[in-house]
Image (cartoon, rainbow, N blue to C red):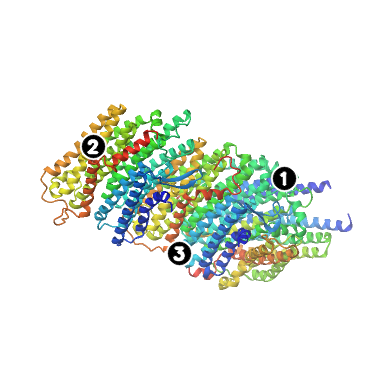
Amino acid sequence: MNWNTWLPVLVVISSMLPGLIIFGLAEHRVRLRTILNLFGAVVKLFLVGWMLWGVYHGQHFETRLMLLPGLELVLRAGPLSLMFITLSSILWLVTTIYAIAYLEDSPNRSRFFGFFSLCVTATIGVALAGNLITFLLFYELLTLATYPLVVHRGTEEARRAGQSYLRYTIFGGALLLIGTVWLYSLTGTLEFAPQGGFLSEIGAEHHTSLIIIFALLIAGFGVKAALFPLHGWLPKAMVAPAPVSALLHAVAVVKAGAFGIVRVVYDVFGVEFATDLGVTGPLAWLAAFTIIYGSLRALFQDDLKRRLAYSTISQVSYIALGVAIAGPIAAIGGIIHLVHQGLMKITLFFCAGNLAETLGIHKISEMNGVGKRMPWTMAAFTIGAFGMIGAPPIAGFVSKWYLGTGALEVGQGWVLIVLAGSSLLNAAYFLPILHRAWFRDPPNNWPHEHDFGRKETAWPLLFPPIVTAVLALAAGILASAPFSPLEWGQIVAQREFYKP
Amino acid sequence: METLTLLALSFDALLNLSLLYLAWILLNCEDLLKAIVLFVAFGLLMALAWVRLDAPDVALAEAAIGAGLTGALLLTALAKLRVIETNKGTTQQLKQDSENFQTLHYMTPLALLLVAIGLGYVVFSMPPISAGLSNDVATNMGNSGVSHSVTAVLLNFRGYDTLLEMFVLLVSLLGVWSFGSTTSQHETTPGPVLDTLTRRLVPVLILVAAYLLWVGAHAPGGAFQAGSVLAAAGVLLLLMGWRPGGYLSTLPFRLILVAGPGLFAITAALLYLLKGQLLAFPVEYAGIIIFALETTATLSIAVILAALFLSEPPHSDKEHI
Amino acid sequence: MYFYALIGVGLFSVGLYALINYAHLLRKILALNVMGSGIFLILIALAKRTGETQPDVVPHAMVITGIVVAVSATALALTLMLKLAAETGRAELSEKDRD
Amino acid sequence: MTLIDYLSTILLIAGALFFLAGTLGLLRFPDIYTRLHALTKADNVGLGLIVIGLALQSESLASAGKLILIWLLVMFAGASVSNLIASGALQRGIRLWKR
Amino acid sequence: MEVVFKEFPWVAVLILLPLLGGIVCFLFSGIAKFTGLMTVFFTALSVLGLGWQIFDNGVYRHAVGGWGAPLGIDLYADGLSLLMLAATAFVALGVSVYSAGYFERGYSTRFWPIWLFLLGALNALFLTADIFNLYVTLELMGLAAVALAGLAGGKNALTGAMRYLLATLLGSLVYLLGVALLYHGFGTVDITLLAQRAEASPVIWAAFGLIAAGLMLKTALFPLHFWLPPAHGSAPPPVSALLSALVVKASFYILLRLWLEIFGPLVSNTDVSTLFGLLGAAAILWGSVQALRQTRLKLMIAYSTVAQIGYLFLAFPLATAAGVAAWSAAMYLAFSHALAKAAMFLAAGNMLRFGGHDRISDLDRVVQRLPLAAAAFALAGMSIMGLPPSGGFIGKWLMLEVAIKQGRWEIVIVMILGGLLAAAYIFKVLGHTFTQAPSPHESKAVPASMEWSALLLAIAAVLLGFLAIPVLSLLNIGNPFGISEVTP
């Protein structure tokens, strides 16, 4: 049993198997379902830890499966994919605990948790994919697995949200398919190589088609990364239950798109070749525009989850911006923001979920004095909010810092203005919430309050946001620690920019 | 002798033109009953044409099945249709064109004319002399077990076709039965004349069928022609008002229905085990095997065609539909 | 012998015209039978081109098979037509109710 | 052209003439009953003459016997069928033709 | 043991077993269901045996009656026919298990014999190398299919069956005329001999025109597809599964076989194949749009068949340059479409039986109450849309690859549009399976065997996505698509 080849598959299986079993479980088998869920999450965490340790010591993990003559499905654990996997597996464990409590007595949970595990499987698959076709396979699987979760509530509104979600993602998938097949017919291979490598030898006459392929791939991934014209589905998808919007629309799905853009720029085209082609410039502009546009739209949203959704749209584009600037430091900034934004955004969504679940608040206008009623939740929310704005001790500051210095190092001064502007806008839409929560006196009765005796809410609802808030804080303070996201970002950037 | 070929030519011309003209009237006349009667006449003229083209077997088949049985089927169908329409009170539209082709009404004749001319040209461009498979048939007649070439081709050289074709007949019967009975069969009381006709004719028909079956080995005849003549006897009996009743659903009757195709398939399988070739008749026994196959085929074809004429599913099926 | 083949083509075309042109199902079934006879006529007329008196026999076997197939198809078509007429009251394929 | 050939040609021509008469009757007669009359009478006699003419030509007794059998069958069938058609016509209420 | 299996007459078993099984079912209607299932099971086994046999000792040619090609009839089995036989066996297993539960006593005695004869006709059709024999098998298949289509009775089913019967009879007659011309033009009805003797002449052009027209009518290619939706839409679900998955593809198989062997080399200058491509593209777009407009589930799936048939004809213009790759892609699409479409119809049948109706807008919470049927429909939909893990994706990927290599951008666009429209109408249905119907109505229990047969067929369609290598190597035994000038 040669572990190096089987570990990646085991990581993928470790969440798929419980998912499939849960599908078969009858509705009332709550205990078994919870055990299976948690068991799957813990096993995955352990395996990822093992792989993390292995890669740190230079081992090589790879599984290959012949799909078509000349095309293989490849699962490979590189430093970049490991970052994304660790993020996903930690957050999956936390969100499962949260979801179990959140969906206490709601109908058809077996179906929910089944698809939930399939989503995580697809995300892990996207992270581990070693070539573009495996990426495409898991990318489309992600669409199929998330659709039932968006439509989980079964209301007409949920169905319409699902339809619009599909319209975007299936369209994106189709663009991706053309781009991939075209690339394959030009180059004959779709392997992710650190510096992209194989594209530069292609003759100059193909450059125009390479640019179009780049546009197709970015558009395909841009749908899920919610780049400007293709972001419409994200606010609508907020109709899904809180754990779904927390893990999926803040972390898994959106990150898959951003991860795709990172893969395309670094491992398919290679940074130098992309800059020679002149494609990184427009991408940077698009990302910048989305950042500003997202923050502006967030200003005017009264519904808490929709505001967070628009803030996600703008935050994810930081990653795209970091990648598009094509400088090593900016690349580190972009990559580590992948992790930091995940941690912070999930905290915010957990808190939003708590407010909705315990006090029945959905609108920001109803949040007066909620800090007094639920101090711990609002504390986590505040850490997350400040992180988003970029206040120093929390992780957000680190990534913005690297993005700014990276941009300056490469001479892209205008990026600084964008970063500053967006931080201001972040402050503009987060601070009023905090002010309202802490400094306003609470209404005499909440819309429909579940009182939990002395505690402010059930502990499994309270525990996850605090954990993720602490993690966000740790990622900020202990940035230079051995296994911190920053250090992994540096390893990845090193592989991408400097010939070994 | 010049006059004889001239006479033959003029006869051919007359026959062909009347065929075409009859087809045209048949398809375009107002009243359906008239169309069907003309169709029967058309079938008989076709039989005449086959005789002129030295195809006696086909002439027999055409006369018995093409004109006879199909005509009978059409007439009973028309009678039943009239009964249904009077019950349902639908008005009797005359020769009304199908709506969906109203628009391209003038287009179709033009297009079809072009198709006809094209096909005519192609047929005309065929080489005047081409032996086709006649030499192969002649050389292999020796070990085909029969001396009449058509039966040899039908039962031996292309026996596989005939095997499938008998299943076509069986499937069409099953299809007819699966559609269930359409109308309550009003019993017509047969007049004395029909009664005497049937009493005399049925035995003669059975004799002729047996003769045709036997003669098939060395002269025009064979399973299909014999089967259809026997079916004619069956039709006559059915017209007499004789109904098989419960007998239809019993096993022996179903066995006869299935005997022809079944035996053919079983022999094919057995021969494969024996000779390693599907449907490879050992030369010395070929004649006997072919005769056995033909007899069962005649029986099955006769009963299937008669049942098709009756088109009433056996009672046992009807109860629990 | 070419003359018969040409008439065969004629029958085929007349049958096709009637099949397309008329709505009544019985007419369509008659048209199909006439078309079949036309094809058989072509098959056997061209079989006489063997040069000697004895014509090529294989087309004869084909035509006999064809006639039997034609009669079984006609029987099925007639029963289906009657069942349809019993159900819809008319022996025509009505275009009105699309699905 | 031996004696037998002469005899059969004469018989065939006579038979043909009878058929001609029968067809003329079919065309000229006013109503169904008279037409039936003409057909069954004239054509049967015509057929008889033709059958005898051909029987003379046929080489073996068996085929002559078969020809005679054909004639008998046609006569038998013709008679009963015309009766059936006539009774059918009466049932449909087709009145007899009066001058 | 090894030798016995190698020499075992799988071809004879494949043809005779269903026919004999049908007879036994007809004779002893009491045990019809049992014999039917057994026959279908053993036929599937013999397809495996045949596959093993021709995988080892190559193409299998057998002269029936020992008379050899021109006079007698030859049976011929190569990769292409093996693929179609495999598709038939798979769908047959699924549909038989389904119909065992679906048909009550009265109908099942009538369903099984006709169904087994249809199966026998399909197997015979894929194995013969004689064009007149193809006519007889086509006719047997057509009549059996019509008998099954009209089994349920009712106005729509009968109108659909009648329209189908007329179309299929007209198609067969036109095909027969083509065969007659070919026979008299070149003196034989055997495909391989015809391939040697045929040279471009008016006879070939006329025969090709007739055969193509007849078979296009029977395959329901775009302009001639009017009969398919009512027939497939209103037939009983297992029958419409058979019609859409197998019967329609059988006539495509014949057209492809004759095109590859006889007409291709003579006639394959671009304008004829571009015509096929155009009709295919029109079928895809028109069929998908019509499917989107339908309010009834089974009619929607029938229109989707019209669209998917269009994909197969897209391979004609592509094959002029890269023959093997284009045809392998088309046949892969055909195989996965057969499985997926059969699963989809069976799933729709389950929903119909469960809710008592198949109106899409008020499918009442099907996902909770009938999860297996919804899962089958979703998985089958994945393969129809061509989303990654499924067989449809592999077919679409191969076809796109060939199209892009040849720079045929209009074909790429049509395929992508087809995929998007397919996604639109499939997810329209899936969306409604989640929501609550305005007027909830009582439901009728659906036996487990019916649900699982639909689901297993759908899973097979998805698993096909991972078996590309073995299936493609099997498909190219005796390279039916000519010597591969480019690596497939």
Q: Amino acid at mark 1?
A: Tyr
Q: CA distance from mark 3 to mark 1?
A: 57 Å
Q: Does residue A182 appear left or right of residue D73 in this picture?
A: left
Q: Does residue E442 appear left or right of residue A440 in this picture?
A: right
Q: Amino acid at mark 2?
A: Phe
Which residue is identified by label 1? C2
Residue drawn at 66 percent across, 58 percent down:
B160
Label 3 marks a residue whose chain is: E
Q: Helix or strand or loop: what does disc 2 sit on?
A: helix
The label number, if any, that marks residue A397 in the structure image:
2
Which residue is identified by label 3? E101
Coordinates of residue A170 in the picture (x, y in percent) = 38, 43
Residue E210 in sight from this viewpoint:
no
Label 2 marks a residue whose chain is: A
Q: Are marks 1 and 2 on the same chain?
A: no
Residue toward you, E179 or A134: A134
Query: Across the whole image, how many numbered discs are drawn on residues?
Result: 3
Coordinates of residue A427 in the picture (x, y in percent) = 19, 36
